[in-house]
Structure formats: C-alpha cells, structure tokens
Image (spheres, rainbow, N blue to C red):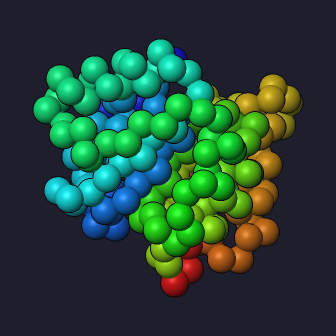
Amino acid sequence: MAAVDPATGAALRLLATATSAKTVIELGTGAGVSSLWLLSGMRPDGVLTSVDAESEHQRLAKTSLAEAGIRSSRARLIHGRALDVLPRLSDGAYDLVFCDANKAENSDYLEAALRLLRPNGLVVFAGALGGGRVADPSARDADTVAQRELVKALREQTRFTAAALPVGPGLIVAALSG
C-alpha cells in the first residue's frame, strides 16, 4: 500500500477546496493519508466516505484520523468492495469521488460517478501516468491497460470534461457537466 505523495495530496486538497466539497467518496482508504488531504480541503461540516475491502487499511486509517484530531462524524469508513458499496450510496449527493482502488474497475467507478456526483462534481483517478507505462504502447500489464481503457471511456463519455494532471504518479480529473 503506497500513500499519496505530498504533491498529489496538495492537488487533492486543492480540488476539494475548489469544489467547496461537503461530501466526498474515497475508494481505497489505505492508511488514511489521502483521507487527511481530502478532509483538509473540504468544508468544516464536510463528511468523507471512504471504502476499502481491507480491514487492516481501515484500522490504520482510523488511527491516522484520530491522531490528526478528525472528529469521527467527519469520516465514515466502510469496509467492502467498492463495486458492492457504491450502489448503496445516494444518487447526486457527492461533490468529489477519488478513485485509488482496483485499477481494473476504474471504468466501473466512472460509470458509478455519473450517478453519484452532483452537477459540476469531480471524479479523480490516481496513477494516471503509471510510471510512464500508460504512454508506452509496449506496456501491457493489467493496471496500464485499465488506465488506457479509462482514458478511452472518458473520451467517449460526453458528460465529463477531463484532463490529466502530471503531479506525483498523475491524476485524471473529470468534471461532470452541470
């Protein structure tokens, strides 16, 4: 489990601030580092919903959040596979969806974001550059192929305006049309 680097964290904080985010979904809790960055950019009354299939990740995140002084009412940690949890979340209720989970499911996360995001909400995908592999046509590992499929899906999806941000391992950011 790799934590987001400071540049990526700062970008997440900026995106949360720019959207005046009150409700955020995070797929892939990790140790809670990205959770802290997102919360630092969210409104003071904002609530982060973080989903992870690994109970150990959620335990570590809970500790990180507590040590940072984050009230338990600001972070909702849900144990489970993202694709099992997302259908249970409210339609059009979220300002930002951050995806740093199973790369093979990124296209499915994009489809879920269409339903979950408010107009002008953002969906953000980690690892957009894939260490340079995404741009290398000879790279055929599963994560790289999944990132390419995500880019293709975004190009075909007319309701999103997207861009790749070259911070850390890269972010793909897409805004849902209003």
Q: Nearer the viewer, residue 150 or 35?
A: 35
Residue at image coords 37%, 18%: 60
Q: Residue 136, image x and y in percent?
A: 77, 35
Q: Residue 148, image x and y in percent?
A: 76, 46
158 vs 172: above or below: below
Kindly tell me whether residue 167 is visible in this rendering.
no
Q: Residue 21, image x and y in percent?
A: 32, 62
Q: Nearer the viewer, residue 95 or 132?
A: 95
- Number of dots carrying numbers: 0
Residue at image coords 33%, 57%: 16
Q: Residue furthest left?
A: 69
Q: Nearer the viewer, residue 39 or 157?
A: 39
Residue at image coords 74%, 51%: 107
Q: Residue furthest bottom?
A: 178
Residue 41 lies left or right of residue 119; in this view the side is left
178 vs 60: above or below: below
Q: Answer with the quarter of the image where residue 91 lies.
A: bottom right
Kindly tell me whether residue 26 is visible in this rendering.
yes
Q: Residue 172, image x and y in percent?
A: 56, 52
Residue 154 lies left or right of residue 63; in this view the side is right
79 vs 57: above or below: below
Residue at image coords 32%, 26%: 62
